[in-house]
Image (spheres, helix red, strand yellow):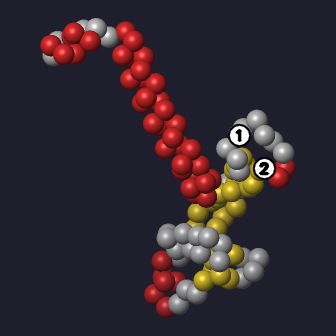
Amino acid sequence: MRKVLHLGDGRLWDGDARRWRSDCGKVTAVRGAGLLDVQSTYVVLACAHLDHDPGNNHPANLAALCQRCHMLHDAAEHRWQRWWNVFRLCAIRDLFEDPRSVRDGRAN
């Protein structure tokens, strides 16, 4: 866990390089009123599987990402998982519901 200075929009202070960085890690300029919005927060790194396979623990497949970057990296996988869960629940309901009750508007 490390305390990090940031501006609330993804830009953060890189203390080692003594520069501001964008949310993509590129060096960026912050001038004037932007410095009034400096906040601090604690950041915890998480281990991300680059190929989204938790069984593949090869060092080349792992990256240490902050929580924000980890969620952005896994966003497509999370969307797919949500879709799959809804699809699966609908399929199970189709197996066990009486289609006549749905058609007639009656609840089981």
Q: CA distance from mark 2 to mark 1?
A: 9 Å
Vertical side of 33 occupied by 83: above or below: above
* Residue position for label 1: 53
x and y percent of residue 2 in the render?
70, 61
Q: Secondary structure at mark 1?
A: loop
91 vs 81, nearest the viewer = 91
Residue occupying the far right of the picture: 59
- Tag 2 and tag 1, C-beta contact below 8 Å: yes
Residue 92 seen in the current view: yes
* Residue position for label 2: 61
Q: Is residue 56 left or right of residue 86?
A: right
Identified by mark 1, the residue type is Asp
x and y percent of residue 10 in the render?
54, 69
Residue positioned 54% across, 49% down in the render: 76
Q: Is residue 49 left or right of residue 87?
A: right
Residue positioned 52% across, 83% down in the render: 35
Q: Earlier in the sequence, mark 2 or mark 1?
A: 1
Which quadrant of the figure has residue 42?
bottom right
Q: Secondary structure at mark 2?
A: helix
Q: Residues within 10 Å of mark 2 (few under 14, many from 20)?
A: some
x and y percent of residue 61 in the render?
78, 50
Residue positioned 77% across, 50% down in the render: 62
Q: Residues within 10 Å of mark 1 (few under 14, many from 20)?
A: few
Vertical side of 58 occupied by 21: above or below: below
Quarter of the N terminus within the rendering = bottom right
Which quadrant of the figure has residue 106?
top left
